[in-house]
Amino acid sequence: KILILDFGSQVTQLIARRVREAHVFCELHSFDMPIEEIRAFAPTGIILSGGPNSVYESDYQADPALFELGVPVLGICYGMQWMAQALDGKVEMGHVREFGFAEVGTVASRLFDGIVDRQGDNGEHLIEVWMSHGDKVTKLPEGFHVIGSNDACPVAAMADEKRHFYGVQWHPEVTHTKQGRAMLNRFVLEICGAQPSWTMPNYIDEAIAKIREQVGDEEVILGLSGGVDSSVAAALIHRAIGDQLTCVFVDHGLLRLNEGKMVMEMFADNLGVKVVHVDASAEFMGKLAGETDPEKKRKIIGAEFVEVFQAESKKLTNAKWLAQGTIYPDVIESAGAKTKKAHSIKSHHNVGGLPETLNLKLLEPLRELFKDEVRELGVALGLPHSMVYRHPFPGPGLGVRILGEVKHEYAELLRRADAIFIEELRATRDEKGVSWYDKTSQAFAVFLPVKSVGVMGDGRTYDYVVALRAVITSDFMTAHWAELPYSLLGRVSNRIINEVRGINRVVYDVSGKPPATIEWE
Ligand code: XMP
């Protein structure tokens, strides 16, 4: 297994993704992981990530004792500079910042074996890479030689092949570096000799054994939301311990159309999972009555959720475990608060944040998985593709998509409009057979509690407005609005206005994030 030390780059997670894609298990830890812990982790190799700082004036310093563990080390960008500095080389501020594509000439090295994009005029090997740095290595540490360079960056890559230490100034983890994946594969599989044994079937067996061992004959409860993570966790745990698992599905009245029915069918009927379906919509609506402030609405929904879940779980007196669909990015995010400044714009409520007062032990079988691995696992466990590849849905549900005061009547209208939008998105196909639903990262309708005038048949209408929102994003931190075809928007608009009495106008949201957010509240 590979250890990745994070020096705070925006793309460190991609390194972990690439290593996992090579079927090698890896974990990402903060740069200041104590050397005893590194030793205990027993990595077959270490990758040092990039970072936004300058090594000569930063307190982002790892413990140089890691160079004495006798395992290969690959430094990327800041990671290479830190390696150079820690091993008595020198790093200085460059005259120009290098950002973007660059071509680098390489010499023979185990890292680049078989990797070449183009032959130069004199037969030299050239590779196309993605650079992003201001500082550069100006003196090599002892034992190192240059294995990649160009005019702007004389030490673009360096190696001490004897000790298996490598440094690259560019980012092999981003797809802009044409053969970046091949470079990482060479490091992980050839240089470190890691076994490519991290596969989904292996993982399922391991995970099931681990759950059984952890839980023994005790009982487990899980808050099932219908989202991907809790669903996959439920399917996995059920596979491991069957009826020792009870799922609690809380319907707060702010779910999508037929969501409750779908969850019950999929889990209770098809998989035979014990699911308690709690219809708490009246309680939620009661608590929300009169409230228009977005933050307060979120807090109310979050608190009420905890209340309802707690009441239900108290009924299950034998339960000793609380299972959650925590996934690896959640773990990294909370652990990496030091290297990443967490921006909290909205108070997010997740089924996750249940209180410790439940006095239950935590079972988090997806803690090691990235989102796409969770999806792969879901499919392998027999969950339908359409559920495993669904768009994310916020914990407070339609509560943040009904602007201002939440009313049952509004929720009913919004549910139907939203279902039409999603149905039409799913029904499209491009030349490759991909639907607009799959091309967008998130799409939904928003209810605007304002009335406008319309005309239908011979009559005048005075009804509500629905806004459609569809975005494309890879991380949900920034997003582009999706350029949906006019014909599709027209069809959705027609259907909503014709089929949902009470709505007579549909608009499309063309705001990016930033400055807008994805949700409207
Ligand atoms: P924003 O609106 O902040 O949303 O651009 C970014 C992503 O987060 C989702 N979101 C939430 N998810 N609980 C959640 O579980 C929440 O309270 C919540 N608020 C927003 C949103 O749907 C989008 O995917």
Image (cartoon, rainbow, N blue to C red):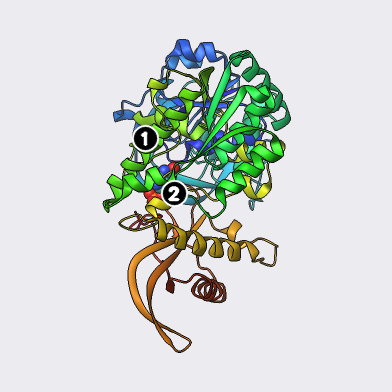
Amino acid type of the residue that numbered disc 2 sits on in the rendered structure: Gly
* Disc 1 residue crowd, few under 14, some 14–19, many 20+, Cα 10 Å: some
Q: Is residue 467 visible?
A: yes
Q: Nearer the viewer, residue 81 or 158?
A: 81
Horizontal and vertical percent position of residue 493? 50, 73
Q: Earlier in the sequence, mark 1 or mark 2?
A: 1
For the point 54% across and 42% down, which residue is it? 227
* Quarter in which the N terminus is drawn: top right
Distance from Cα at disc 1 to Cα at disc 2: 28 Å
Q: Does the residue labelled 2 lie within 8 Å of ligand 1?
A: no
Could you say where residue 279 lies in the image, as x and y percent from the top left?
A: 48, 42
Which residue shows up at 40% across the image and 25% down it? 85
Query: Who is closer to the viewer here, 469 or 198?
Result: 469
Residue under the image location 41 percent in, 60 percent down: 409
Judge from the rendering whether residue 323 lies leftward or rightward of residue 448; answer left or right. Answer: right
Residue 374 location, quadrant = top right
The residue at which mark 1 appears reads as 340
Cβ–Cβ below 8 Å for labels 1 and 2? no
Q: Which of 409 and 86 is in front in this view?
A: 409
Residue 20 location in percent, x, y?
62, 33
Q: Can residue 107 be seen in this view?
A: no
Above or below 397: residue 417: below
Residue linked to disc 2: 397
Instruction: Say if 510 sits above or below 269 in the image.
Output: below
**Which of 422 and 509 lies nearest the eye of the viewer?**
422
Q: Which of marks 1 and 2 is in front?
A: 2
